[in-house]
Amino acid sequence: MAAIFPVSSQEKHEKTKPSTKSITLRISKFNPGKDHATTFLEFPVSYEKWTTVLDAILEVKNYHDHSIGVRYSCRQAMCGSCGMIINGKPKLACFTKISELDSDVVTVEPMNNFPLIRDLVVGFERMFSTHKRIKPYIIREDSEISSGAKEFLQTPEDVEKYIQFSGCIKCGLCNSACPTMAVDSTFIGPQGLAQAYRYIADNRDQGKDERLRIIDERHGIWGCHFAGSCSQVCPKGVDPAMGIQLLRGYLLGYRK
Amino acid sequence: MEKDRKEGIKGMANPGRYGIERVAYWLMRITGLGLLVYFIGHIYETSSLLDGKAAWNSMLELTQTTEGHIFLALVIGMCVFHTGNGIRLMIAEAGFGFGKARRPDYPYTPSSLNMKNKLCIYVSIGLAALAMMYGLGVMYDV
């Protein structure tokens, strides 16, 4: 029989006492309408092993500086709103624990290769318009409503071909990490190209030729040099680099 | 009012943040430019033949210095890496070597950054280093 040991009041206190660990949170501040240069504000923030970077930013926003501009929503890596550069790499702030960064200083900056709105908030208009350009929907003449079958059946194998790429939450981290996006604003980008593959690989879709015509240009699929940084930063396992190379197979005639 | 946060050449060339694939990307660009410079220099060098044997010999003497040997060793290294990594990229960009697309499970490990690709990059770097050493050995009669 297992012995039950009463928990002493000291042990109870140790379990519930707040963390003594703390980091310096450096937040990039820049308002294009007012400021001339980016400044970094520094705040000491205590953290627990489960504290995320977003928690730390919100603590600073709530108790130290209300003016900090940050966009967030779901806090569980589903909405794709809180992408930012954390200690030099694009990450979701809600999906990055401070304890995992292994650093006494955490620097947060807005994502690269996007227009800056204010502080940590960037504009997604360009990414969304590129996303729309590749026609991110099933294209076919008949529809599930008008056809006699009422639904287009797919085998699990058919779904496996594209399901990985349908996990994209449009957070923009891949575009922020892409070296081609760093120098070419007109490049479609890993987000848009991976989505083009997602629909082309879907056997319900009949818009392959239409989409391949859109991406078959210098600022389209041929702008990718397979640096793989997009896949490395993707928080949802989408692997845009793989999608882009598989997409090239259609244009080079290896894939039908 | 918005300000574009485009990283520019500095961000494109920064190889340190994203692993060996980004280093390979950066080396591919640098070696490509280096080989272009060598190609132009090579045309200039061989065009000295038109001015006779003496001009050709004096041009060849330029490569018989320590700086010349280092430059040629770098050309050998650039050539070998660019070829090795180029073959890897041609195969990968045709869509081969990743396996099949599949439902991802956490923690996500991208198939495009698999060990086969990493190994090819390391082999290309290793071969380039070996070729440079061999070239230097020949040039210095070791």
Image (spheres, rainbow, N blue to C red):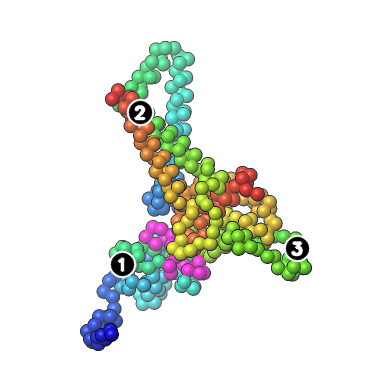
Task: Tell me the chain of label 2.
Answer: B
**Which amino acid type is marked by label 1?**
Thr
Label 2: state its secondary structure. helix
Q: Residue at x 40, y 41 (%)?
A: B123
Q: Which is more toward the observer, B105 or B21?
A: B105
Residue at image location 33% in from the left, 32% down from the top = B133
Mark 3, residue position: A142
Residue labelled with disc 2 = B135
Instruction: Check whether the beta carbons of the residues at disc 3 and disc 2 lie within 8 A of each other.
Output: no
The kind of secondary structure element at disc 1 is strand
Magenta highlight on residue A92: yes
Q: Quadrant of residue A22?
A: bottom left
Measure the alpha-carbon separation of dots 1 and 2. 51 Å
* Residue A217 in view in this figure: no
Residue A153 image point, x, y percent: 68, 65
Badge 3 sits on which subunit? A
Q: Which of the 4 quarters of the picture holds residue A109?
A: bottom left
Q: Nearer the viewer, mark 1 or mark 2?
A: 2
* Disc 1: CA contacts within 10 A as few (<14), some (14-19) or many (>=20): some
Please state which of residues B87 and A66 is positioned toward the viewer in this rendering. Answer: B87
Q: Of residues B25 and A176, which is closer to you in this image? A: B25
